[in-house]
Image (cartoon, coloured by chain):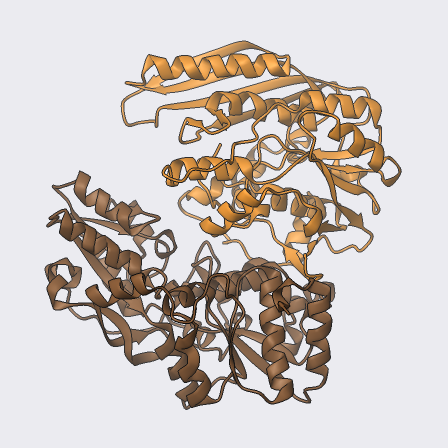
Chain colours: A orange, B brown
Amino acid sequence: MTIHKSALSSMSTSIQPPATFQRVVLGHGGGGLLTDVLINQLVLPRLGNPALTDLLDSGILDDGRLALTIDSYVVQPIFFPGGDIGRLAVSGTVNDLAVSGALPMGLALSMILAEGLPRQILERVLDSVAATAAEAGVRVITGDTKVVGRGQADGIYLTTAGVGKMEPSPQPHPARVQPGDVLIINGPIGEHGLAVMLAREMPEVQSVLRSDAAPLNGLIGQLRSCVPGVVFMRDPTRGGLAGVATDLAARTGYRIILEEMQIPIRPEARHAADMLGLDPLDIANEGKVLMAVRPAEAQAALNLIQSHPLGHQAAIIGHVSAEIDGLCVLRTEIGGQRIVQKPYGEQLPRIC
Amino acid sequence: MNIAARPSEELLRALHAFAADINRSIAFMEVCGTHTTSAFRCGLHSVMPKNVRLISGPGCPVCVTAQADIDELIDLGSRREITLCTYGDMLRVPGKHGSLEKARGDGANIEVVYSSLDAVRMAQTHPDRQVVFAAVGFETTAPATAAAICAAQELGLDNFTVLASHKLILPAMRALLSAADRPKIDGFLCPGHVSVIIGSDAYRCIVEEFNTPCVIGGFEPGLLLSSLLCLTEMIAAGRVALVNQYPQAVRPTGNAHAQALLQKVFETGNARWRGLGLIPQSGLFLRQDYARFNAAQRFNLKPVEDHEPAGCICGRVISGLALPPECKLFGRACTPVQPIGPCMVSSEGTCAAWFKYGPHRAKSHGVAPAQQLQEVLP
């Protein structure tokens, strides 16, 4: 946290989140700088403890043997190309455990339903929860159901918590990242956020884009058992690749270099992002993992990921450089460079 | 030879070679928000020759809208009987009293739409509501507004109106070049999308009257570079011409259908612009035949006096006279989440682009950004 804070304040001449706020705005839930403000000002001072303050995807318990994570899902529409709220709720929580170096053991599922929700919708969502859990090889072992009055919630909200067993190999952690480490992503970026946004805002647009929502524990487990040099993993959900890469830079203090030409992205996703005025780097993914791998093992890691169904289009997209300034820099296709900033707030509300 | 098909490295080498032949600093102006954003996103400013700059002009539709027009819009949007349909960029632009976003928070009916026809559909499905479409933008969005009005007329809708502040780009370019406080402009990178409508020949008057080169360019990094190369080459050779570097989309005479639609629904008149004041014949106003679709008329909007937010220099920024970091508010009081001026709100705004993509070549522009940001850039 210390590194994180100092890196933020050293950039304060160009970025200053509002010092304080009186009302929550949508952007506070965007996974960007505004979310940091909310957590740093309100949550950590009251609830801070060593496990929480590390701000990883899971909290680690029992002397590093167990991992616990939780996430809520409010996506609108409930069903979208490539997924639905049920698939998202299982994948997101399983992935938060997996990138923390844990094998998912069981999930808890909490549902908040609005009065009047058609039975058929609930059935479809629960079928999807079941199918995705089966895909991930994990069971829902407890849960809760609440119903609120019509208009007090939008259809259905899900919360999933997950508990996982930490693998004996060292936990992936920003503190293990060194200059020279290679950054790998397992496929094209931006598709979840764009698919949901198009489905909601431009239903008349026919697009081939589909959400990438998928449980990654199979891919990650296989990789970690074969390649010990995977030192950091994070799923670039809200805030996108930009959010994760800038966080990594701020937390390690090293400069992170991304190579634009190497970052996989479908032309359709690029065009859709252009049309919506968004930067693909900022857009959420739900079936992607960014990892830092020791250079000697990078090729082996890449080969292994590419042989997995969820990693055919994996690519090496950058590296950790030795400069200590905590910045993320993108080398662009014309040989220019620009600083990548953590997205500020919410660009696409209710995408997960 | 098709200059646009050359690889980026080759274009850059040629650009630097021509720039080296020019013994002075030159500045080209882009007058299109999409060009502004693409240039920042691809790090264009970090690879430009030291003596060649690309500055932003009045190309972002939200940014050029006068504060008084924004105040009118917020006034209208706050009325209980009205459902206001707006493009998303307009939502957070601050007026004298709050923004549309704040009005929505306070209970006003404000809907974000992606197309003018969505607003017509809204009027169709909500016959009990007065639906007002907030029509902003240049020749690119104006035909869509005209189409919406024609559709509403065909459907016989009497609950659909438009608050139009559409603008024309050519009068603004002329105004800039004629201003006493004229920014240094050695050539224009003309907007790709607007040119699809108005055609490349439209810029001939700028080339001939003001002896200023004009190149119409696309948006991909390679197309941007080739347009800048073309402009630099002209300066080096002492040549002034109009070149269409985006022939795949832009025809000499433009899109006749869209032009006819504009002609049918709108007439030109004097319009107020942020930073540039009143520019003769620079705005599109509904013709008398379509007056019943004019929201200002239907809801008796009283003229509002124009003003600029205190300390905000958006007007100077879009006139090419100042860079965002020269503003005292930039990045401090004014950020994308708490914007003061429109250039920080719109995704195509110059301040938003500077904020998001970091200061570029700031040293050579005579401003002092964060030290560590400078060091990263060549």
Left or right side of B354 for B109? left
Q: Residue at x 47, y 17 (%)?
A: A110
Q: Position of residue B266 (x, y in %)?
A: 22, 67
Q: Nearer the viewer, residue A135 or A350?
A: A135
Q: Is residue A189 above or below residue B37?
A: above
Displayed quadrant of residue A119: top left
**Image location of residue B148, percent across then percent down:** 23, 53
Image position, residue A235 (x, y; %)? 64, 34
Q: Point out the residue furthest to the front here.
A: B1
What residue do we see at 32% from left, 65% from top? B256
Of residue B86 and residue A254, the one placed in the foreground of this image is B86
Foreground: A259 or B343? A259
Asked if residue B239 lies left or right of residue B255, the reply is right
Locate residue A214, reporting x and y percent.
59, 25
User: Hey, which residue is sitting farthest right in the picture?
Assistant: A296
Q: Which of the image's four quarters has the N terminus of chain A?
A: top right
At 48% from the left edge and 59% from the top edge, which residue is drawn?
Answer: B335
Q: Using the rendered image of the protein, determine whether residue A286 is visible from the camera's viewpoint.
A: yes
Along the line of sight, the residue nearer the viewer: B277 or B198: B198
Disc tally is 0
| Rendered view: A324 above or below B327 | above
Q: Is residue A217 above or below residue A105?
A: below
A38 to the left or right of B290? right
Q: Is residue B366 visible?
A: no
